[in-house]
Amino acid sequence: MIRVIFRLLLVTAMALVWTTAVAGADSRYHRWQNKKSFVIGAMYYDLAYGPVWWKPVPKNFRGDPVIDVLKQAGLNLLDEVSMSSGGHTWYPGLRTVRRQKLPFLTLAGPWEPFEHFQTRVNWFAEDSNFFGVQLADEPQKPANQTIHRRQQVWIEKTHPRLLTLICESLTNTPAWQAEWTAIKSDAIIFQWYPYGTSDGRSPTITRPVLACLERAARHCESHGLGFFVARGIRSRPKSESTLRLNTFAALAAGCRGFVDFTWGASSPESGYVWYKDKTYQGPSHRFQLLARINREVAHLGRCLLKLRAVRTYHVDLRTHLTWAGPNYGFDEPDKLRTGKLVAVEGSPIERAPRLMVGFFRDPADQEYFMVVNKRESRSVDVDHDQLAQPVTLRFRDDVTAVERLNRETGKVERLPLKDGAVEFILPGGTGDLLKVSNGRPFAGIK
């Protein structure tokens, strides 16, 4: 019986994958994303770090996001999530980014009367850098979902260029599926905070959490939704490998952007920057690491936005069901891949190398694949070099070379094969994007 159920799930998933291009080709999200960069954003909450909204702004106030630092972090969008709190027009985040013409989102809420919501959206509706409205954060109450659905319909009719989003925990799959069904937003921001999930006691990111990631990706792909992830940078300090795996596993699954929670924290160990007594203190201890990861994401994102995500496969696992859905082994015979990439191997001394591969297709039906090193450590003191993993890719006989989009430079590199294989090293938690060399360019790369 279990085998029958699993095969039914498999057939259904295959149907969803192959109908994605039709289902989402003309969605509101795809029209919105056209000619925009890969989103690398952060949430800004002024009530946590700025003045209390009903009091006058002090003359020496330094709670605004520092725009030069924000750009140094590699961010290209600010999600001002204070909108549901004060109801005022003076928002430090918006004041700063509007002055510097940086794209922004605002947060709504289940406001009544409905005119309050309309007023707040209309405040910024004529600003071309106003990209959209995050309707809600974890809208699990049915009554609120009804209000958010009304907001969604009004925005589609009155301000059709604006994107609408909801935010929910990646691992709470029943909640985000029910919320989207009720609200029909254009995109979902999935909160993926490693070790802040239902599997938080595990020393590594677990199989069910990766299954949740695959499930969320395919849900968004099949419905033409924007698939965004809020990475876990604000809570307790994360190691470099965990922050990288948090990023590159999401990219391999088809993530279209990051909207991190949050820009600032009250400790120098978390966030992009930190505040004390509601005053900006400077970059956090993790700032340079986050900025470096974001630069790599920006380089890869130019291509990834042009691709259709197909499915992720795990080299160290056989296909199996988890409480969150299936994880697929690399040997899964689902015929979704071209078969040019024959095998993925790690270190010869490892029985089961911790690698995953995300497969993609571009508009010309070229196949791409992102190989990710799943090795990571919770400890911030671990030697990151110890988590690096040798990778060997073996190809069909008719393949003579592969190309890799260098995540650090954004340039395409040609990698000749030796004895039908190519070898390289992947740092812990990191992924590389490649395709078979066939004379055609990387999508999105001039």
Image (cartoon, rainbow, N blue to C red):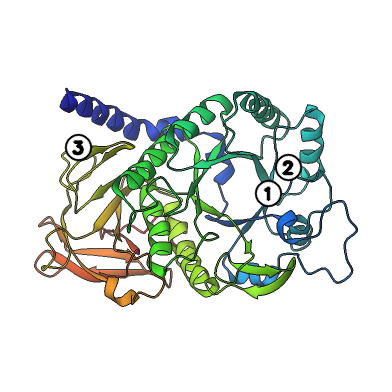
Report crowding for label 1: few under 14, some 14 to 19, many 20 or more residues within 10 A (C-alpha): many
Left or right of 93 in this view: 310: left
Left or right of 59 in this view: 323: left
414 versus 36 height, above or below: below
> Is there a contact, CB below 8 Å, between mark 1 and mark 2?
yes
Identify the residue position indicated by label 1 in the image: 81
Q: Quadrant of residue 75?
A: bottom right
> Is there a contact, CB below 8 Å, between mark 1 and mark 3?
no
77 versus 377 height, above or below: above
The image quadrant where one finds the N terminus is top left
- Residue 389 visible in image: yes
Percent coordinates x, y for residue 158 in the rendering = 73, 31
Q: Secondary structure at mark 3?
A: loop
Q: CA distance from mark 1 to mark 2?
A: 7 Å
Percent coordinates x, y for residue 37 in the rendering = 55, 55
Q: CA distance from mark 3 to mark 2?
A: 46 Å
Q: Residue at x 82, y 36 (%)?
A: 119
